[in-house]
Amino acid sequence: MKKVLYVDTEKSEKTSFMVVFDKLVKELQEPVDFELPDWCDKWKPMPFTSIKRNIYRTKKVRKRLDDDDGIFCSCTPSAGSSSVCGKDCLCGMLFSTCSSGCKCGSSCLNKPFQSRPMKKMKLVKTEKCGSGILADEDIEQGDFVIEYVGEVIDDKECEQRLWNMKHQGETNFYLCEINRDMVIDATFKGNKSRYINHSCCPNTEMQKWIIDGETRIGIFATRDIKKGEHLTYDYQFVQFGADQDCHCGAVTCRRKLGVRPPKPKMASDAAFAYQVYQTGRMHTGGSSHKCIGQVVRINERFGIIRQFDKYFKKHLIMFEDGTLNSVDMSEEDWELVRQ
């Protein structure tokens, strides 16, 4: 997912208020004491219509997930356990919530969007970043924080809205790319997630999940967050116009919002990829283990490695939409998601 920012590089015209103010200053010539009216000092966030679910302005793309697709929850309730479908749940590993066919029933934990209420948060005014969001309760690492919602539009509509808002003098945009030719626009309709600011060292992240065949965006905590902390995530901007200064204050700050973060050196670097490609095994920390069952991201798609063909040097990947593809890992841009 990429947050989209538009920055107008043209010099904007003065507002009618500023024109009158400049004229008044010239006529007075000498400095005078004055006080601004109370309404000038009252901070008000940009108005929007609050919604709970995405509103589709384009054709909704749903991925059909049923028992025939190959992706299903294999978890079963155990005696003495009050909850199931944890970290080892196959659906959860593929960022897909369990369906109604899950045997765990109401005990299922793999339904963050449906069964976990959004965290308490507070809208505040920041010193340099406009509006922002504070956590109004302690949040644990991995917790579901809030869903990013808005109007779902296609690329054509997105481009038209950007041009219209530019000519209207708007400078704030709340666009998040879901899939190819599908963008969530929370400019006019959304929830508090639209106010979460960027940080080069964030405490939350966006995750793309499949819920009942629909792609939805959730914001999850990447570490423990204390009450009163600012909620942030890395926008990973697709930039239009000049770069915008970043004021996140992180030690690793990239200074500009349009600067893409460097890709971390993970277990999926060139040597590791070649190793997996040749042997079908992973060698990490001095030990060796099979790559079968590992979750990988291949060209923005998530999948689980099911088999390795030693003769053809290809891996059989089960992707999030249930399809099974034989993949030559040496020819793909991929990374390990979980070990």
Image (cartoon, helix red, strand yellow):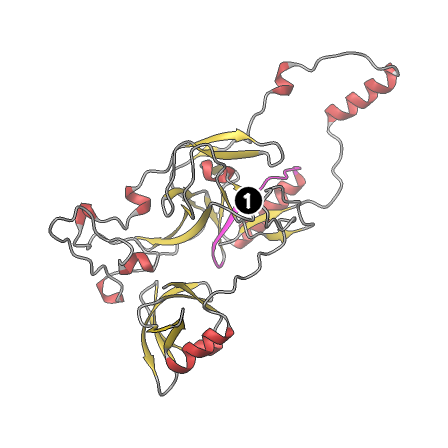
Is residue 91 left or right of 202 when viewed as pictured?
left
- Magenta residue check for 239: no
Residue extending farthest to the left is 79
| Secondary structure mainly formed by the magenta segment | loop
The residue closer to the viewer here, 251 or 270, is: 251
Residue extending farthest to the bottom is 311
Quadrant of the image occupied by residue 288: bottom left
The residue tagged 1 is: 198
Q: What x and y, as percent, mark residue 221?
A: 41, 45
Say which residue appears at 47% left-offset and 66% top-offset: 299
- Seen in the picture, residue 46 relative to 266 is either above or below; the reply is above
Is residue 104 left or right of 160 when viewed as pictured?
left
The residue closer to the viewer here, 223 or 150, is: 223
The residue closer to the viewer here, 164 or 190, is: 190
Quadrant of the image occupied by residue 168: top right
Quadrant of the image occupied by residue 302: bottom left
Residue extending farthest to the front is 286
Say which residue appears at 36% left-offset and 38% top-offset: 118
- Seen in the picture, residue 192 relative to 89 is either above or below; the reply is above
- Image quarter of the C terminus: bottom left
**Residue 153 visible in this rendered orientation of the protein:** yes
Q: What x and y, as percent, mark residue 212?
A: 30, 53
- Seen in the picture, residue 6 relative to 310 is either above or below; the reply is above
The magenta segment is 168-180
Q: Secondary structure at mark 1?
A: strand
